[in-house]
């Protein structure tokens, strides 16, 4: 199903429909402030295998990010961080940044793996904010892959729906998307390291 928003954010009935879909284990595609994302509710552990099948990868090899509404649930998934690091992260959200942090004991249960780190994002996108806030938990997110000859399908919601409509439960049309990636920052050591320079500038 392709759900159009006409650039005005989501209406209440649309939000209810999306949340119901996610709470029943659905997988959705949605706009962010970078690439369109594909994901499910963080508590939908059984959907991880399905996401991996869509991406044609083993679930252990998928790069997941947790999309949050704000930083209030940071301690639910990451080990305690210093006050300076928290202030640094807070000064860069919402925005196109992924912060890699040391995971706490809850993360291996979520991902059914031995992951010791977790990527956390707070995208600057109204639609994602509306979904996560209404759902009451973060989205388990992976970006739609793009190749040199696949720019159109990765940015055009109708093309995305044509490609993935039979594999996912819902595609949210938030307008033409970006081809840019987020900037990934390794915050697990004493000094912050740029793992991938994306659209976000430090």
Image: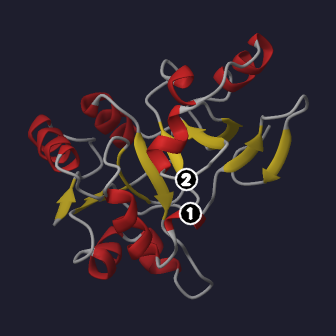
Q: How many labels does the image show?
A: 2
Q: Do the numbered discs 1 and 2 sit on residues whose CB atoms are within 8 Å?
A: yes
Left or right: 116 in relation to 156:
right
**Is disc 2 surrounded by few (<14), some (14 to 19) or many (20+) residues within 10 Å?**
few
For residue 113, the mark is: 2
- Percent of width and height locating residue 73: 48, 22
For residue 119, the mark is: none
In front: 111, or 170? 111
**Is disc 1 surrounded by few (<14), some (14 to 19) or many (20+) residues within 10 Å?**
some
Figure quadrant of residue 119? top right
Residue 66 lies, with reference to residue 3, above or below; the image says: above
Secondary structure, mark 2, is: loop
Q: Which residue is drawn at 83% across and 47% down?
A: 194
Q: Residue at x 39, y 59 (%)?
A: 48
Figure quadrant of residue 98? top right
Residue lying farthest to the bottom in this orientation: 149
Left or right: 81 in relation to 4:
right
Figure quadrant of residue 28? bottom left
For residue 60, the mark is: 1
Residue 182 lies, with reference to residue 169, above or below; the image says: above
Residue 37 lies, with reference to residue 95, above or below; the image says: below
- Percent of width and height locating residue 41: 33, 44
> Alpha carbon of mark 1 to alpha carbon of mark 2: how far?
7 Å
In front: 153, or 54? 54
Residue lying farthest to the left in this orientation: 13
Q: From the image, which quarter does the N terminus lie in?
A: bottom left
Secondary structure, mark 1, is: helix
């Amino acid at each position: 199903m392709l759900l159009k928003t006409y650039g005005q954010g989501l209406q209440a009935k649309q939000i209810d429909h999306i949340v119901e879909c996610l709470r029943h284990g659905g997988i959705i595609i949605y706009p962010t402030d970078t690439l369109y994302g594909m994901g499910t509710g963080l508590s939908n552990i059984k959907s991880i295998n399905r996401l991996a099948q869509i991406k044609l990868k083993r679930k252990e090899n998928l790069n997941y990010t947790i999309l949050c509404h704000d930083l209030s649930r940071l301690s639910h998934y990451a080990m305690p961080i210093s006050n300076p690091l928290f202030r640094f992260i807070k000064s860069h959200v919402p925005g196109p940044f992924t912060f890699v942090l040391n995971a706490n004991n809850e993360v291996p249960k979520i991902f059914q793996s031995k992951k010791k780190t977790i990527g956390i994002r707070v995208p600057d996108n109204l639609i994602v904010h509306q979904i996560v806030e209404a759902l009451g938990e973060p989205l388990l997110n992976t970006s739609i892959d793009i190749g040199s000859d696949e720019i159109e399908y990765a940015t055009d919601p109708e093309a995305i729906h044509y490609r993935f409509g039979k594999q996912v439960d819902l595609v949210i049309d938030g307008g033409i998307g970006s081809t840019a990636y987020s900037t990934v920052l390794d915050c697990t050591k004493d000094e912050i390291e740029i793992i991938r320079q994306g659209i976000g500038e430090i």
